[in-house]
């Protein structure tokens, strides 16, 4: 490993990405002429942890050149063919490697477990030919230290331009800004642990205006979906910058956002229009016939719309926690403890409130059904149930003409049900 003057640290890793990579980091030691080499294990897109099980030896020729300031680390590794989460074939003509660098003031520390390292400014990848015919010892090289001339302490000069051992590509992508990170985390958190569930709970209010679905529920959910798409765009930008588009966190995000954009609005719209058509076609029929299954297709759509939305909200909230894990350990620079605590508490409170409201609503509807079945409607007459736009049923009042109204996640109002004192026949 060789780095020019002005390098704060240089990292080299075996693998195609940080997660699972076997990494070596180099920086200046407390001795101005020496370097410190720290073996590390990559676990994600955050500072790799020190790897105490690595078996490495820093060979002669390593150090900092007093005249040029160049940092050099000649390393022998006896654990690089098989490490905890990976292997490398020593005959691979195209082995995968990654690198990263941060320029700045020297660290001047002998601490191999250093945890206050600044994030890399540039990174890239390349492929290396490990076959013997490409990586044979240079003429006069020592078998114990191929970087030094046999029998002397003279370094062998490196000439990358004439070497056939390296190939393929390297890159220096721009890193995501802190503003992009914050925007992604804020928008997705607001959407999945606050706005989506609270917008759904609005439909459980006891008194809702007519057309609550069309003028309250749908606009609020579409506005939240727009915020989700903005946060999703920030997330995709970060994943591409970090070459990490196939990790578990972005993949789950792709699925959730695709369902919310392509499936859920369409399903809700179909459910709404079928409800309106069902209500219109039933207006001239007896209300008792409406309750006998003529709206079964609508009820199925309402049920699917409800539970698909709930599933996506839960999956999105879980994926937020996975995003913390991918970004770094709790307490690190990008994952402060207070952020994880706030996220967990708010998600737990909203989740418990959601379940409580739904269970209470179901219990109340069940009680009303039992009362009607026992002939205990108002006026002693028999009430009839009508279709509700969320896929449930609305209860009419017996004993006089009345209007049954119900509320729920998928809809806000019920079909009118007419009932006379003895029930209309």
Image (tube, rainbow, N blue to C red):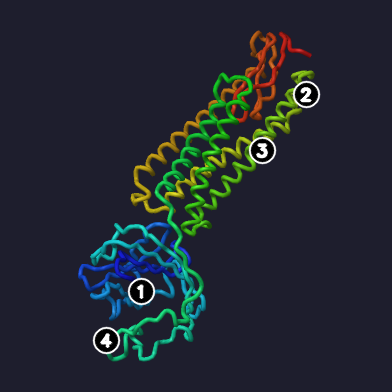
Instruction: Name the N-terminal-most of marks 3 and 4.
Output: 4
- How far separated are the C-alphas under marks 1 and 3? 56 Å
Instruction: Name the N-terminal-most of marks 3 and 2.
Output: 3
Q: Residue 304 placed where, x, y %?
A: 65, 37
Query: What element does badge 2 sit on?
Result: helix
Label 1 near label 2: C-beta < 8 Å?
A: no
Query: What element does badge 3 sit on?
Result: helix
Q: Quarter holding the N terminus?
A: bottom left
The quarter of the displayed image where residue 174 is located? bottom left
Q: Nearer the viewer, mark 3 or mark 4?
A: 4
Instruction: Name the N-terminal-most of marks 2 and 1.
Output: 1
Q: Residue 83 placed where, x, y %?
A: 42, 70
Q: Nearer the viewer, residue 309 or 99?
A: 99
Residue at point 48%, 35% (across, down): 194
Q: Which residue is mark 1?
A: 1
Label 4 near label 3: C-beta < 8 Å?
A: no
Instruction: Name the N-terminal-most of marks 1 and 3.
Output: 1
Q: Which residue is mark 2?
A: 281
Q: Which residue is mark 3?
A: 266
Mark 4 nearby-residue class (10 Å; few <14, some 14–19, many ≥20) = few
Q: Which residue is mark 4?
A: 153
Instruction: Name the N-terminal-most of marks 1 and 4.
Output: 1
Residue 267 vs 34, above or below: the answer is above
Residue 74 vs 202, above or below: the answer is below
Label 2 near label 3: C-beta < 8 Å?
A: no
């Amino acid at each position: 490993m060789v780095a020019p003057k002005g390098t704060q640290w240089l990292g080299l890793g075996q693998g195609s990405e940080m997660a699972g990579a076997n990494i070596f980091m180099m920086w200046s030691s407390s001795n101005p002429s020496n370097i410190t080499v720290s073996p590390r294990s990559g676990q994600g897109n955050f500072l790799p942890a020190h790897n105490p099980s690595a078996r490495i030896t820093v060979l002669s020729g390593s150090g900092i050149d007093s005249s040029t300031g160049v940092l050099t680390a000649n390393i022998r590794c006896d654990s690089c063919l098989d490490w905890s989460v990976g292997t490398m074939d020593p005959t691979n003509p195209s082995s995968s490697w990654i690198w990263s660098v941060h320029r700045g003031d020297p660290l001047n520390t002998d601490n191999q477990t250093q945890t206050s390292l600044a994030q890399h400014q540039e990174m890239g990848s390349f492929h290396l030919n490990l076959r013997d015919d490409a990586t044979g010892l240079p003429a006069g090289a020592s078998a114990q230290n191929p970087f030094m001339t046999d029998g002397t302490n003279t370094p062998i000069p490196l000439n990358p331009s004439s070497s056939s051992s390296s190939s393929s590509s390297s890159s220096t992508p721009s890193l995501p800004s802190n503003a992009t990170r914050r925007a992604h985390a804020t928008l997705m958190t607001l959407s999945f642990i606050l706005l989506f569930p609270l917008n759904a709970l609005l439909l459980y209010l006891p008194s809702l205006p007519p057309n609550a679905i069309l003028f309250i529920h749908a606009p609020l959910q579409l506005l939240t979906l727009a915020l989700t798409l903005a946060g999703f765009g920030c997330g995709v930008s970060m994943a591409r910058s970090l070459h990490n588009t196939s990790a578990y966190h972005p993949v789950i995000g792709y699925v959730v956002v695709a369902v919310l954009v392509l499936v859920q609005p369409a399903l809700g719209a179909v459910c709404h229009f079928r409800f309106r058509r069902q209500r219109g076609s039933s207006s001239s029929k007896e209300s008792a016939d409406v309750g006998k299954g003529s709206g079964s297709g609508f009820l199925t759509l309402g049920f699917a719309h409800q539970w698909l939305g709930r599933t996506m909200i839960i999956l999105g909230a879980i994926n937020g926690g996975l995003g913390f894990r991918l970004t770094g350990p709790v307490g690190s620079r990008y994952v402060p403890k207070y952020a994880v605590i706030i996220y967990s508490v708010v998600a737990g409170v909203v989740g418990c409130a959601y379940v409580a409201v739904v269970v209470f609503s179901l219990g109340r509807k069940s009680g009303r059904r039992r009362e009607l079945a026992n002939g205990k409607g108002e006026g002693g007459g028999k009430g009839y149930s009508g279709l509700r736009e969320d896929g449930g049923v609305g209860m009419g009042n017996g004993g006089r003409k009345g209007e049954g109204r119900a509320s729920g996640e998928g809809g806000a109002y019920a079909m009118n049900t007419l009932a006379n004192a003895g029930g209309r026949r």
